[in-house]
Image: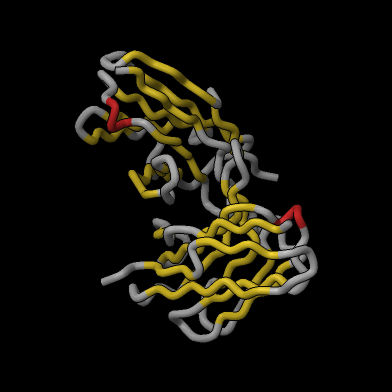
Amino acid sequence: GQQVMQIPQYQHVQEGEDFTTYCNSSTTLSNIQWYKQRPGGHPVFLIQLVKSGEVKKQKRLTFQFGEAKKNSSLHITATQTTDVGTYFCAGPPNAGKSTFGDGTTLTVKP
Amino acid sequence: NAGVTQTPKFQVLKTGQSMTLQCAQDMNHNSMYWYRQDPGMGLRLIYYSASEGTTDKGEVPNGYNVSRLNKREFSLRLESAAPSQTSVYFCASSEAWGRLFFGSGTQLSVL
């Protein structure tokens, strides 16, 4: 069945460094969503990508959807302490499965 | 506009006790979901309701039951709580299978 794998599980960076998390699916995805969860909080929607090769930017965040629609990435330029949290990718539900990746937890050292 | 409201925020149960987690959304969404989140893991779907009057099992339904009371409300019931059900529970809603709006979560501990 469809599985979404996310790497790395943890990333520690110095403030100002860049950060990237990668999401890979075993099957082609019709779309992919990205969420951010702050410590102790709930997941909050960031963006949805639909088109093959799509690239979207939100300020310092750049989201990409692979040409084959099996992988995606989130890149943060010049991290800030406010970027701390866990970033999840999620494919569309399949046969009742939520297809969330396990997330990448980002910590930022000031 | 409150979005998705979950109650309670915290709950401690003894093994074998029962309880119901309540969830309500005010965005007129058709679809509602219950997820659990364990440390270091992603969100696993327990049950979902694609529309009022329908419910379906997700990937981890054992030990849970749900009720889609009306379009706004979707409750999750633990009939006989077990320590393995210690987790953070999130309710969410969406229009079709689009963007998910999450509630603030319920921290449940089963002793």
Q: Is residue B102 visible?
A: yes
In the image, B68: left or right of B59? left
Q: Position of residue B6 (x, y in %)?
A: 46, 68
Give how far across and how far down residue B93 sits, in percent. Answer: 44, 66
> Which quadrant: the N terminus of chain A?
top right
Picture layout, residue B13 above or below residue A60: below
Q: Give the tally of numbered discs.
A: 0
Vertical relation: B16 (above or below) A28: below
- For image coordinates 59% across by 36% down, the residue present is B40
Location of residue A54 with respect to A108 vertically, above or below: below
Instruction: Please state if A80 lies on the left or on the right of A65 as rendered.
Output: left
- The residue at 57%/75% (across/down) is B75
Front residue of B76/B14: it is B14
Q: Which residue is more in the foreground, B108 or A94? A: B108
Q: How is the image coloured?
A: secondary structure
Looking at the image, the residue that sits furthest to the left is: A59
Evaluate whether residue A67 shows in this view. Answer: no
> Which residue is more in the foreground, A91 or A79?
A79
